Image (cartoon, rainbow, N blue to C red):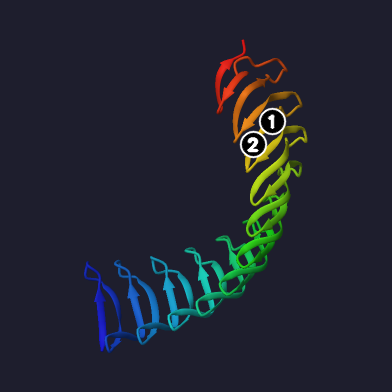
């Protein structure tokens, strides 16, 4: 029996065959502006067969692929609203499998990698819109695990180190866009720990201090870009505490900022 459903404004919402009260065969759906949004085949009330989905203006096919027993199956393609390909790959019983590729809306490749039983697996690479590599590393059961590297859009190395179960672990380094070392230190279960050092883009020392459980803790020192000290004092759980000395860029003591701190608040200035 042919069946038609309508939106509150009277425009057609869906149309297709009903058998024993459930959808059967080819169905079409429209948005409340009268533009077709989906074409879908059904079997026994479940999506089964070819599926096509359009953008709200009806101009772009946003998705095309097949359903089996209400789950995606086989090759699928997804598109941006502009019409360019967004991603392409295969499903098996509703889960992504095998090689998948995604693209930016300018047509440049965005990522390349494999899926297994709906989870990212093995080596993956991601790319900036200009085509240069953004990151590369390995997934194990959908979590980053092993060596990873990240790059700036100009191609320069931005960071590298190890992941364990999606958390940074062990030695890590980050770099400025000009290639100069920016930070160096250790991670433990995703949190910074131990001694860390930082540098300005010109290679001059910027900061040195320790982390405990991901927060700055203990004695910290900071320097201006051209070398002179900027500040020195103690940190607890990421906040300034106790006596702090601060200096102007010419090396003179900054009396306005120097003094006794408690939880980042200057309680007593040194005059």
User: Of residues 18 and 97, which is closer to you in this image?
Assistant: 97
How many tags in the picture?
A: 2
User: Observer-nearest residue: 13 or 145?
Assistant: 145
Residue 269 shown left or right of residue 47 in the figure: right
User: Which one is nearer the viewer's eye here, 181 or 36?
Assistant: 181
Residue 205's spot in the image, x, y percent?
76, 33
Snapshot quadrant of residue 243: top right
Residue beneath the point at 33% across and 72% down: 30
Q: Check disc 1 and report the residue beneath it.
A: 220
* Quarter in which the N terminus is drawn: bottom left
Q: Is 230 rendered above or below residue 58?
A: above
Question: At which x and y percent is residue 145?
Answer: 68, 61
**Quarter of the image where one finds residue 214:** top right
Screen quadrant of the C terminus = top right
- Relative image position of residue 190 (x, y in whole percent): 64, 50
Tell me the element at label 1: strand
Asked if one can make out residue 35 in the rendered structure from this viewpoint, the answer is yes
Task: Give neighbour class at mark 1: few <14, some 14-19, many 20+ (Cα, 10 Å).
Answer: many
Mark 1 and 2 residues: CB-CB less than 8 Å, in contact?
Answer: yes
Residue 216's tag is 2
Residue lying at 60% horizontally and 35% vertically, measured from the top left:
238
Residue 144 position within the rendered picture, expressed as x and y whole percent measured from the top left: 65, 61
Compared to 12, does 267 lie above or below? above
Tell whether 103 sits left or right of 42.
right
The residue at 39%/69% (across/down) is 58
Can residue 110 be seen here? no
């Amino acid at each position: 029996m042919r069946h038609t459903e309508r939106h509150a404004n009277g425009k057609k919402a869906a149309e297709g065959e009903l058998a024993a009260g459930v959808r059967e065969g080819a169905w079409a759906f429209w948005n409340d502006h009268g533009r077709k949004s989906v074409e879908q085949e059904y079997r026994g009330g479940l999506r089964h067969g070819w599926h096509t989905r359009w953008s709200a203006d009806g101009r772009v096919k946003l998705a095309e692929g097949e359903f089996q027993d209400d789950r995606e199956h086989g090759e699928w393609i997804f598109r941006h609203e502009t019409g360019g390909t967004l991603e392409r790959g295969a499903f098996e019983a509703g889960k992504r499998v095998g090689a998948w590729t995604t693209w930016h809306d300018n047509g440049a490749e965005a990522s390349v990698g494999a899926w297994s039983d709906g989870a990212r697996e093995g080596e993956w690479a991601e790319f900036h819109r200009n085509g240069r590599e953004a990151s590369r590393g390995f997934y194990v059961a959908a979590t980053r695990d092993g060596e990873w590297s990240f790059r700036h859009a100009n191609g320069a190395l931005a960071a590298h180190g190890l992941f364990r179960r999606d958390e940074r672990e062990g030695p890590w380094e980050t770099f400025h866009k000009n290639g100069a070392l920016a930070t160096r230190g250790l991670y433990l279960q995703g949190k910074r720990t131990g001694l860390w050092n930082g540098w300005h883009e010109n290679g001059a020392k910027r900061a040195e201090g320790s982390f405990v459980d991901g927060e700055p803790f203990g004695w910290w020192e900071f320097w201006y870009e051209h070398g002179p000290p900027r500040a020195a004092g103690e940190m607890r759980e990421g906040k300034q505490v106790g006596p702090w000395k601060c200096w102007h860029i010419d090396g003179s003591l900054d009396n306005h900022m120097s003094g006794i701190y408690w939880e980042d608040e200057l309680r007593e200035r040194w005059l």
